[in-house]
Amino acid sequence: MANYGRTTIGASWLEFEFRRRSRKITISTDETMVKILAYVRTQGTASNGTKACLLNPVNQAIVHESSLLSGFTDTSGAWREWTITGTITAADYWLVLAADGIAGGGNTIQVAYDTVSSDSSLYQSWFPDGTATWPSLGSFVGTEDAAAGYTQDISLYLETSSGGGGGGPNVPLARRFGPQSFQRILVNL
């Protein structure tokens, strides 16, 4: 089993309905996907639905799309899972959360995050293009929210049943570089 992305819980909350919140991951070897997890909560009586997906960072095409997660009403926050299956090939991807919702309404959905130094190569946010038909994410490319997304390190990761692991800024050195490399680093200190 390997995890790609952020597996720790952020201290703040960020709304993401009708907007994509994303983090970059790097898959170093072909992997078998199991699920995508995010630490999320609702701010009301229901959640209309959220999806997670993996996007090609070059053309923003959806490479893999999860099942729909809907109907949870947890206002305190919990790790939620989106089923995603298949093989993912070694490459860079945007790991994305998107939600159907009404900002500030009874179905507001939020993800845990921390504010970090601005880095558009690791963290981004997009508005939809206005033609998305829920629950399809096919048109969820839209306009980048450059003012907001670059500093939001969201609690979101991909779990695989095979190999590697790593691919994110919050991965321990021993897992990012392998135990032998880590031992060499310690010896050389």
Image (cartoon, rainbow, N blue to C red):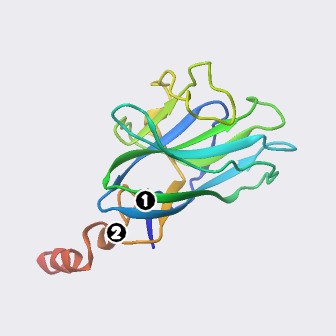
Q: CA distance from mark 2 to mark 1?
A: 13 Å
Q: Which residue is rendered at x = 25% and y = 68% of the image?
A: 177
Residue furthest to the left: 188
Query: As displayed, is residue 175 above or below residue 12?
Result: below
Which of the 4 quarters of the picture holds residue 184? Answer: bottom left
Quarter the C terminus occupies: bottom left
Residue furthest to the right: 45
Quarter the N terminus occupies: bottom left
Query: As displayed, is residue 106 above or below residue 153?
Result: above
User: In the image, which disc is placed on residue 87?
Assistant: 1
**Which residue is nearer to you in this view: 160 or 153?**
160
Q: Position of residue 94 (x, y in %)?
A: 43, 43
Q: Position of residue 104 (x, y in %)?
A: 77, 30
Q: Position of residue 96 (x, y in %)?
A: 52, 43
Q: Callout 2, which amino acid?
A: Gly
**Which residue is nearer to you in this view: 184 or 90?**
90
Q: Position of residue 131 (x, y in %)?
A: 62, 20
Q: Nearer the viewer, mark 2 or mark 1?
A: 1
User: In the image, which disc is placed on residue 59?
Assistant: none
**Which residue is nearer to you in this view: 55 or 170?**
55
Q: Which residue is rendered at x = 63% and y = 25% of the image?
A: 132
Q: Callout 1, which amino acid?
A: Thr
Which residue carries the number 2 mark? 164
Query: As displayed, is residue 128 above or below residue 54?
Result: above
